[in-house]
Amino acid sequence: MSTTNEQTIKKRRSKGERTKHLILESAIAILAKQGIKGATHRAIASHANIQLSLTTYYFKDIQELVQQAFELNSANIISEVDDLWQPAIDLVDKQSKADLRRVSVRVALRAEIANLLVELVTTNTTDNHQQLIVEQQLFSEVQVTPVLRAIAKEHHLAQLQPCLQLCQYFAQDNLEINAEILLTQIQQICYRQLLADNSQSVEKIHSIINQALAIVIRVKP
């Protein structure tokens, strides 16, 4: 095959990949605004400002399109997870094992980590508002769409990793349970913040996170 033909094929493939990505990003936007029932080929094509035939060309049916949209949304969220949790992990990593056994140090760390996790919640709900809505839909939709369970499970495990990394500094026993408690609280706070008319105050968010951290760090609430 000539170099010119190879370049032409590569260019076509690149354009096709961009179009497919545009369709999936548009599907995510529709899922966030209209829910899964509103995610139709026509609505997605309209949002992407492309011909309707292109959505059916790249995806055999709407189920495949929606499934891949959930996969892309999950990948987008997971790509930012480590950066969101890193400040809290770095803070604890600076401490010696001897210091981490001191109650006074753990109490001080709980306050600092709580502040960092409040910032995490604020950043996440502000910058990733749409992604969080679709994430919540993924966890709800697995009840009626079993094919999404593998995506949801992988997504959850990826979200759990930084929680495990943080919790392991304080205790190895009940490590997974503590990490699950912390992650669940953070996720529920984020989902609650999506409700503009029912969002929680910073003080309440701080209080909830403090309670969860008391279990993880093993200090009195």
Image (cartoon, rainbow, N blue to C red):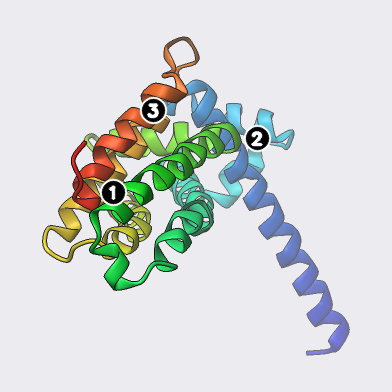
Q: Amino acid at mark 3?
A: Ile
19 or 60, which is in the foreground?
19
Sequence-first tag of 1 and 2: 2
Q: Residues within 10 Å of mark 3 (few under 14, many from 20)?
A: many
Q: Amino acid at mark 1?
A: Val
Q: Which residue is mark 2?
A: 52
24 or 204, which is in the foreground?
204
- Between the residue at mark 3 and the residue at mark 2, the CA separation in whole angstroms equals 44 Å
Direction right: furthest residue: 4
Closer to viewer: mark 3 or mark 2 = 3
Classify 160 as above or below 34: below
At 79% from the left and 81% from the top, the residue drawn is 6
Which image quadrant is residue 111 in? Answer: top left
- Between the residue at mark 3 and the residue at mark 1, the CA separation in whole angstroms equals 34 Å
For label 3, the SS is helix
Image coords of residue 11 (percent x, y): 80, 68
Q: Amino acid at mark 2?
A: Leu
Disc sitting over residue 205 in the figure: 3
Q: Which residue is mark 1?
A: 147
With 19 as the anchor, is 86 left or right in this view? left
Quarter containing the N terminus: bottom right
